[in-house]
Image: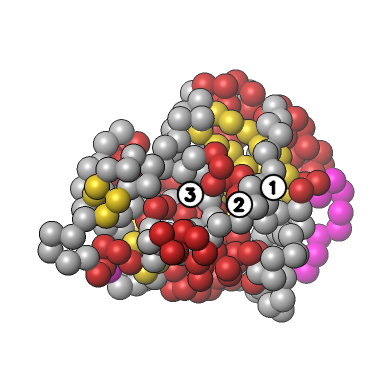
Amino acid sequence: MAAAAACLRAPAPARLVPVMVSRFEEELRFGLHAFAQRSPQGGVAAKAPTKAPTKAAKDPPDTMRVLCLHGYLQNGDVFKQKTGSLRRVLKGCEFTFLDAPHEAEPFPDATGEDAEASASAEGGVLRGWWSSGENQCRKDGQVFVDELSKGTMEWVRPAQSFSYFGFEEGVTYARAAAAEALGSQGSFDGVLAFSQGCAVTTALLREAQSMEGHPLASVRFVILVGGFVPKDPAVAAKLRGDGDTRLSLQSLHVSGVNDVSVPRLRSEALAELYEPSQVAGFDHPGRHGLPNGTGAFKQELQ
């Protein structure tokens, strides 16, 4: 595991300069206005979700389309519930929520936000874009060392894994589901993602740089909440690309001050993959979750 960590060691990422959400809201509203003025242009094996992507009714051709990718132990419906206040700020947008292809293995020690996610599903299938390879290959009695607490654990959370299981399938499915949601016309203008979804979003955007007809080729902004660069060296390399070309689009990286699952430094490392002049950051007082409904984030959005 130490060897794997060494593979990911890189120069310390530049600190994000937090900006007030009100400024981000102003920029998004300006973008919406500008868009309105343009002319319309024409372990567990993977399982297919039980329903099609959740999508609002068809809107006018000048509506901005935003793709939404949830985190681990969630699904499209759970994520939709958690993004209500943010979506109200982004008026004039059509949101498409995808379900990840893998059924998620519940946390044995689920508490707090993990338990809340399970309750929010109301009987729905909780999903993930990948799972921990360590859990798939674990032998009876084997334990792992938690690099954050330095304690031992019998189960590795996906965000802490050094060996991903099902990541390629997750990205492939997200690409196909996004293309299907678009149909034969239109394009996505933005992406809203949480946790695991941020890594999948970045992988898709990296693909879109060279893949003709990619469903995310026209994306102009992303909102990444609790995102991180994977610890799996092979997966991290896919997100970094050639290491020199940054993803050129506006990006907002949101971090929880008390997030112990994905500390802010990991979100900053993800922000390093995006064009610095177009990167903004926001810290909320919570943990690993979307800051909707309470606290300073809601106040700034209002």
Residue wearing tag 2:
270
Which label's residue is closer to the chain start, 1 or 2? 1
Q: Is any part of residue 186 visible from this angle?
A: no
Question: Image check: 300 left or right of 156?
Answer: right
Residue wearing tag 1:
251
What is the three-letter code of the residue carrying label 3? Ser
Residue 154 among magenta residues: no
CA separation in Å, label 3 and label 1: 15 Å
What is the three-letter code of the residue carrying label 1? Ser
Q: Sort mark 1 into few (<14), some (14-19) or many (20+) by Cα contacts within 10 Å.
A: many
Task: Evaluate if marks 1 and 2 touch, with contact meaning CB atoms under 8 Å apart.
Answer: no
Mark whose residue sits in front, 3 or 2? 2
The secondary structure type at the circle numbered 1 is strand
What is the three-letter code of the residue carrying label 2? Leu
Question: Which quarter of the rendered picture does the C terminus lie within?
Answer: top right
Which label's residue is closer to the chain start, 3 or 1? 3
Residue wearing tag 3:
195
Q: Is any part of residue 7 visible from this angle?
A: yes
